[in-house]
Amino acid sequence: MKPLVKMTSAVAFLVGSACTVAAADEQAMIADARSAAPDAISMNATIMDWEGNTLQQGSNGFTCFPTPPTLNGTAPMCLDAAWAAWADAWMNKKPFTATSVGISYMLAGDGGASNIDPYAAEETPDNEWIVEGPHLMIIVPDAAALEALPTDPDNGGPYVMWKGTDYAHIMVPTTGK
């Protein structure tokens, strides 16, 4: 075999191998993202990576993300447009007021967060650190509607997380899919 043919064959093999690995990684990210919500939601959701790339276009108004590579303790999530606005405000430390009810799923649970401090990066003796199993989260446009709910994650039902902040939301523990 001539050197140019050998080199061309080697380059084609490497490019083909890289495409196969990238496709496998993309399929793994899609499967991970879909694990966040019930199949009825995630199968028709847009799937995006954390760099803003659309991996699969959806049709139901939900967007699912795989486990983030850098947000410690976070798991895959699937959110509607209201929650996408909430997430943008939270990640960029901007004020937020919900204008509609919003739903977000995290059926894979999470790795832990403070129940009172939206920006706590780790457990401390006074930040009420919790690790939540499968759950969904609800935001409401009227913060007064949250007053009737407890903030205790051990109460056996829904509770308010981050009460008194722009990022307050209802946590609803579930049993998963």
Image: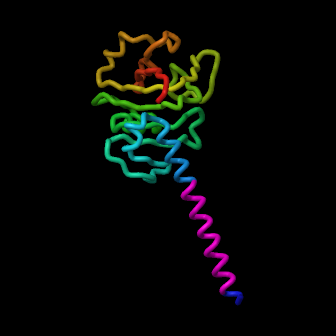
Query: Is 132 part of what is drawn in magenta?
Result: no
Q: Which quadrant holds residue 75? A: top right
Q: Which quadrant holds residue 22? A: bottom right
Q: Looking at the picture, how far across and down is residue 122, in whole percent?
A: 62, 27
Whether 3 is drawn above or below 46: the answer is below
Left-right relation of 126 to 159 = right
Count of numbered marks: 0
Color theme of the render: rainbow
Question: Which part of the image, by quadrant, shows the N terminus?
Answer: bottom right
Left-right relation of 140 to 133 = left
> Residue at 42% across / 52% down in the picture?
56
Q: Looking at the picture, how far across and down is residue 49, in whole percent?
A: 49, 48
Query: Is 23 part of what is drawn in magenta?
Result: yes
The majority secondary structure of the magenta stretch comes to helix
> Residue at 54% across / 40% down in the picture?
67
| Residue farthest bottom in this picture | 2
> Residue at 49% across / 23% down in the picture?
175
Whether 4 is drawn above or below 134: the answer is below
Q: Which range is magenta? A: 5-24
- Name the foreground residue: 109 vs 144: 109
